[in-house]
Amino acid sequence: MSAGPTREFFDPVRFLSNPSTGKMGFALAEAALKVGWEVDLVSGPVSLANPEGARLHTVVTGEEMFLKIDTLFDTCDILIMTAAVMDYRPRDYSAQKVKKTGGGLVVEFDPVVDILKTVAARKRDQLVVGFAAETENIEAHARVKLAKKNADFIVANRVGVPGSGFAADTNQVILIGPGEAVETLGPGSKLEIAEQLIARFAIDLENSL
């Protein structure tokens, strides 16, 4: 499982990131441990206690997260990509702090490796689950992501509304599966939704054995 944000630096003291706190990913790890799963939790910078029993792998950048997940993927049964990975990183990194000049600043960006798409391209019997934080047309965007990423499920939710998305303790999500499968979970606590998701994915894992 992956959780939290990633950071992309353009000098030693400044970086680009997002508001992800890792709460949903850590809740999923906790729920998976409760049903007896072994859990490798690859997390960006968060302020959360490691779920007892999980093997925690801490990373900062998208490249670091990719390298760790890439090494773990081939031996896993299920990958749940909850992390909010930055899509772009500054093209140039300054070894010294960039000083304020009083004028504007233009920064060019390069894409960060698409972790979900890259590892899912070589999946065998693994179940692959992606997350999508959207601001509009949630189901439509999630279906596009499901196809493009070669995932089995996409868990989508709207950000920017009270009680859902980044930093909230509660959530409401849409689970998009193969074909026309759609299931709404919540509103509820992130742990409650995590437990429902893990129960759902466990059925698919059992059927694949």
Image (spheres, rainbow, N blue to C red):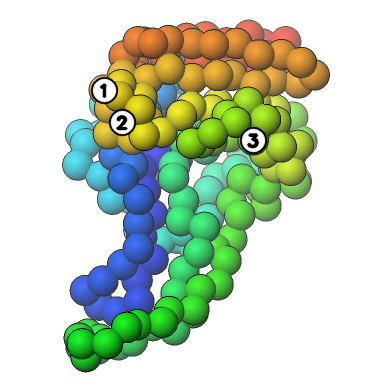
Badge 3 element: helix
Give the farthest residue toward the front: 103
Quarter of the rendering containing residue 164: top left
Quarter of the rendering containing residue 139: top right
Q: Which of marks 2 and 3 is nearer the N terminus?
A: 2
Q: What residue type is labelled 2?
A: Lys
Q: Position of residue 130 (x, y in %)?
A: 58, 34
Work out whether 43 lies above or below 200.
below
Side of 106 where 101 appears, left or right: left
- State the mark number for residue 23: 2
Q: Is residue 91 visible?
A: yes
| Disc 3 residue crowd, few under 14, some 14–19, many 20+, Cα 10 Å | some
Q: Is residue 67 visible?
A: no
Q: Distance between the residues labelled 2 and 3?
A: 23 Å
Mark 1 vs mark 2, foreground winner is 1
- State the mark number for residue 141: 3
Q: Position of residue 125 (x, y in %)?
A: 74, 29
Q: Which of marks 1 and 3 is nearer the N terminus?
A: 3
Badge 2 element: helix
Mark 2 vs mark 3, foreground winner is 3
**Mark 1, residue position:** 169
| Disc 2 residue crowd, few under 14, some 14–19, many 20+, Cα 10 Å | many
Q: Which residue is rendered at x = 48% and y = 36% of the image?
A: 135
Work out whether 27 lies above or below 34.
below
Q: Where is residue 26 in the image (x, y as percent from the top left)?
A: 34, 30
Instruction: Depth check: give the residue in front, 138 or 4.
Output: 138
